[in-house]
Amino acid sequence: MTSLLACLDKSIEGAMDEKKSEIEFQQDLRINMGSKLAGYSCFDPNVTMTESIQNKTWSNSRTNYNIKMLFDKPASKIAYIEKFASQEECNAVAGGVSLEEVNGLDGLYAKKGDMTVPSGGGTISKLIKRMHSFATESLRIPVDSKTSREVSWMHYGENAEDPRRYDAHCDGLCDGSSHSRGDHIASFVVYCEAAKKGGHTHFSNSGIHITPEVGSAIFYSYFDPLTDVYDAGFTKVTECGVLEGNKKVISHKMRSS
């Protein structure tokens, strides 16, 4: 009996190792294919936006917002929100930063400026509060508003011959590891100016492609509050280069409380 159990243990262990190797192979294949798809999608002007898997309405301060859910897994959510921000809000953030040229740091090629959310209310504070409210309702856990106060403005200029972009990256951890309190759990990108050609947003590992309109926003989370683990790479995002025109965005990352 003992020898039989030992034999079964070895058989089960071998089967599990084989299954693990198969999963790792499929994951590597998905990542490799995703990077190739991102390169193609960013340079093809005819690529269209991914169709939503669910359309819904979100209400905040007596205003209704149309939400297109593009990807929805416990640890990985991607939502496109129409008419999320006003031109006044965009102008307020743009006027509050000093831009510096970033040439390749962390894969970013753009003009970037950072600021801390002003205290005491105001246009920028209302925008960030709206972001936090949406994140809290989506994840069903509170965002730490005291530590989630950094806002970035990024300007991607036209360069058709060498369209620099923000290479594939994760805003937080996206390796399936355990979450630590205070880490980033979700991000917002608000499109204040959209390029005439190019300048799309692409999530290569989940196959999500976004062709934004001015005033719209994307929300993506990379944390499962039930299991307390991070996304396994589905929210790795690429900001495509601008082929014609300009692309100007507000970026904000949120931390858990």
Image: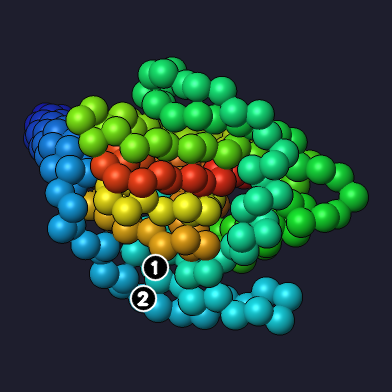
As drawn, 137 above or below 255: below
Q: Provide the residue designation for mark 1.
A: 69
Q: Are marks 2 and 1 in contact (CB under 8 Å)?
A: yes
Q: Answer with left or right where residue 134 lies relative to residue 15.
A: right
From the top left corner, tell me how far across and down residue 23 is, in percent.
16, 39
From the top left corner, tell me how far across and down residue 36 is, in percent.
13, 37
Q: Provide the residue designation for mark 2.
A: 54
From the top left corner, tell me how far across and down residue 2 is, in percent.
17, 32
Disc 1 secondary structure class: strand
Colouring convention used in this rendered image of the protein: rainbow
Q: Considering depth in this image, is 131 or 153 the residue closer to the camera?
A: 153
**Residue kind at label 2, given as amino acid type:** Gln
**What is the total number of numbered labels drawn onto the structure image?**
2
- Say which quadrant the C terminus sits in: top right
Disc 2 secondary structure class: strand
As drawn, 174 above or below 57: above
As drawn, 177 above or below 69: above
Q: Considering depth in this image, is 126 or 134 the residue closer to the camera?
A: 126
Q: Residue visible at 32% across and 58% down?
A: 211
Residue 135 shows in this picture? yes
Q: Quadrant of residue 64?
A: bottom right
- Say which quadrant the N terminus sits in: top left
Residue 117 circle label = none
From the top left corner, tell me how far across and down residue 254 is, in percent.
62, 44
- Number of other residues with Cα within 10 Å of mark 2, as a class: few under 14, some 14 to 19, many 20 or more: few
Query: Marks 2/1: CA distance?
Result: 5 Å
Q: Answer with left or right where residue 128 lies relative to residue 104.
A: right
